[in-house]
Amino acid sequence: MWTKTRHKVITVLGRPIIAMLCKIRCHFKVGEKIRLTKGQPRLFLSNHSTAYDQFFMALSVNRPLYYMVSSVAFTPFVSKLLRFAVAPVERVKGKPDSVCIRNTYKIIKEGESFWIAPEGNRTLDGITGYISPSIVKLIRLLKIPVSFFVIEGGYGIQPRWANSVRKGKIKCYVKNTIDYEEYSKLSDDEFYSIICDNLYIKEQSLGNKYYSSKLAEGMEKFAYVCPHCNKITSFSTKGDVISCDICGLSARYLPDMTFQTLDGNPFAFKDTAEWYAFQREYVHNYSFLGLDVNTPLFYDDEIILLNNVPRRKLDKGTLIFYPNRMEFVGKKQSVVFDLDSTDSLCCTTIRARDVLTIHCSRESYLLKPSKKVNTFKYLHMFYHAKNLLNCVNCTAKNEFLGI
Ligand SMILES: [Zn+2]
């Protein structure tokens, strides 16, 4: 049995502590509970905007809820603790995992409900991100009702790139529920489109305001292309202002999640959603043709290289992106990640705000910045280079950039 009585006991005992934590950290108030019955499992799908989403979900139902976590989301000690306390299903981001699907199936067959954030990643720009169409297959396999649990205000309260939590509204609710009889009549494309529509949120359109004295701080982990000098660059932030380190272009980030120039005029982008779209377009159009393979496109110092399992520090050094490879050069060792490698399992993701994880067939590494570094530019360029090599029918519109 995957599900245990102790999961229920720990959930009941831990609920008040988690409720208090969510109230203090995110101003989240538990609303009316969704009543679940043992033996009548339900699948909850939600958008993913904060590090507390699984708690918002868990506090909104009356029974223990099982969920999926990334294998690199927690330290080995915390993972062990979670396995004992609530037994989440672990998956390796970016890798197909039949074991994890089997375990989810097992939990459902034992009559308990399950939560998944199908984006797999917290939104970076305030809009619900890419959802893999494989979610349709998983739901069809489970044959249970699906509820769409929508989290509004998560990006406002705690943007993924931010150093601090802001004051403002957060609201969670079940938007819609679809029974097996209903979705079994739909085609895969129709069902996928219904899933995406129900989970779609653009936080900037909700009209909420969020307050903090550090509104822009941390945004250098989000922004890496400047609209003025049109280069991949680094940014600095202080208070509510973000500035380009090359040309000095500055903008103010306001409580309503929009930008304006320092003298109060409209900025190049209305909000982070527009800035993110611009960066994606920049990467989509980036050509490696004719570039010298030994001239770095960009690099960052003071990056810590760690082994994923067992988790241990291997070295500290510089991460460099060349037109044909990504390379870590440390004091003791160098690691090369070929972009034209035939190793199809080699993929990268970002854990938390800036930890670049690289899973290859034999090894998994974590590259952790020890100062403010934007690692999303590595992720996006890595996928773009791979797509150019492997994807025959890709167009700029459908190109997946790792998030
Ligand atoms: Zn600039």
Image (cartoon, helix red, strand yellow):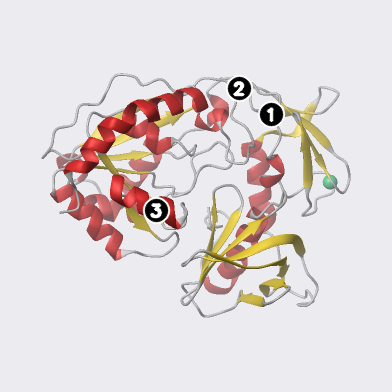
Specify the label residue 67 is tagged with.
none
Q: Provide residue 39's location: percent of width, then percent of height.
A: 10, 40
User: Which residue type carries mark 2?
Assistant: Tyr
The label number, if any, that marks residue 215 in the structure image: 1
Query: Which corner quadrant of the image does residue 100 belong to?
Result: bottom left
- Where residue 202 appears, x then y in whole percent? 52, 32
Q: Secondary structure at mark 1?
A: loop
309 over 215 or under it: above or below: below
Label 3, label 2: how many angstroms apart (C-alpha)? 33 Å
Q: Are marks 2 and 1 in contact (CB under 8 Å)?
A: yes
Given residues 285 and 21, the one toward you in this image is 21
Q: Secondary structure at mark 3?
A: helix
Going by the image, does 18 lie left or right of 178?
Answer: right
| Mark number displayed over residue 210 | 2
Rate crowding at label 1 as few (under 14), some (14 to 19) or many (20 or more) other CA atoms within 10 Å.
many
Residue 149 is at least partly visible in this image: no
Task: Give the residue type at disc 3.
Answer: Ser
Q: Position of residue 345 (x, y in %)?
A: 46, 72
